[in-house]
Amino acid sequence: MRRVMLVDDDALVLRALERAMLPLFHGEDVRLETFSDPELALLRCGEVWFDVVMSDYRMPGLNGAEFLQVVKRLQPDAVRIVLSASSDFGEVSNAINRAEIFRYLAKPWEAQELRAIFAQAFERFDQAREIRRRLDGAPRLSAEELELRKLEEEEPGITFVRRGPDGAVYLEQDNADAAWPREE
């Protein structure tokens, strides 16, 4: 089942989005949840995982960019979409970058554009989930192992210690075949 959260302080916009989206997903298992209060929507994000979260940009209190930044921390795999009637694209583009927004949708929207954006968002969500699943199954390196790899990349050979039969540490010289300690 797909879960979609729609957030807009205007109840009429939420109803219009629902009316536009329900026929688009007819026959598909998609559950829409709408919220006119971003604070309540965040509480819901703490209870249920969403595939896609779409929020209006301009809302009183918590604006869409701030809301989607919090969603990103709570649900990093959720695909975030911003909806806006704002003509100040510079302002909206900053928000897009801060919250790593997947797509921007202008009000008023076209039904086919809405369908295409959500199809792409579901695909992106599935890809992120698959990557996370693979990473969760992959062996993990400890912080120490990661640091050793980093050191070895920066200074090849630095993590290898050559020892003599008596336990003495031999250091390689850059321009000689000799190693320390020298026997004299």
Image (cartoon, grey):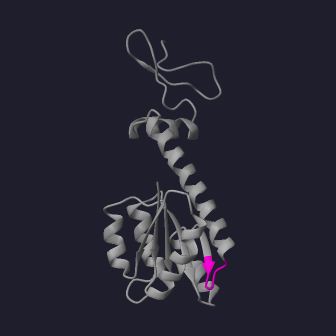
Splitting the image into 4 quarters, where does residue 82 fall?
A: bottom right
* Residue 95 percent across, percent down from the top left: 54, 78
Residue 16 among those drawn in magenta: no
Closer to the camera, 50 or 149?
Answer: 50
Boundaries of the magenta span: 105-110
Q: Residue at x 63, y 67 (%)?
A: 115
* Residue 8 percent across, percent down from the top left: 46, 82
Q: Residue at x 50, y 39 (%)?
A: 134
Residue 107 among those drawn in magenta: yes
Left or right: where does residue 43 sit relative to residue 55?
left
Residue farthest top in this picture: 165
Q: Residue at x 44, y 61 (%)?
A: 50
**Number of marks drawn:** 0
| Residue 5 in view in this figure | yes
Closer to the camera, 154 or 63?
Answer: 63
Splitting the image into 4 quarters, where does residue 94 fall?
A: bottom right
| Residue 97 in view in this figure | no
* Residue 96 percent across, percent down from the top left: 56, 74
* Residue 64 percent across, percent down from the top left: 47, 80
Q: Residue at x 41, y 60 (%)?
A: 75
Q: Main secondary structure of the magenta part?
A: loop
Closer to the camera, 40 or 152?
Answer: 40
Splitting the image into 4 quarters, where does residue 147 fall?
A: top left
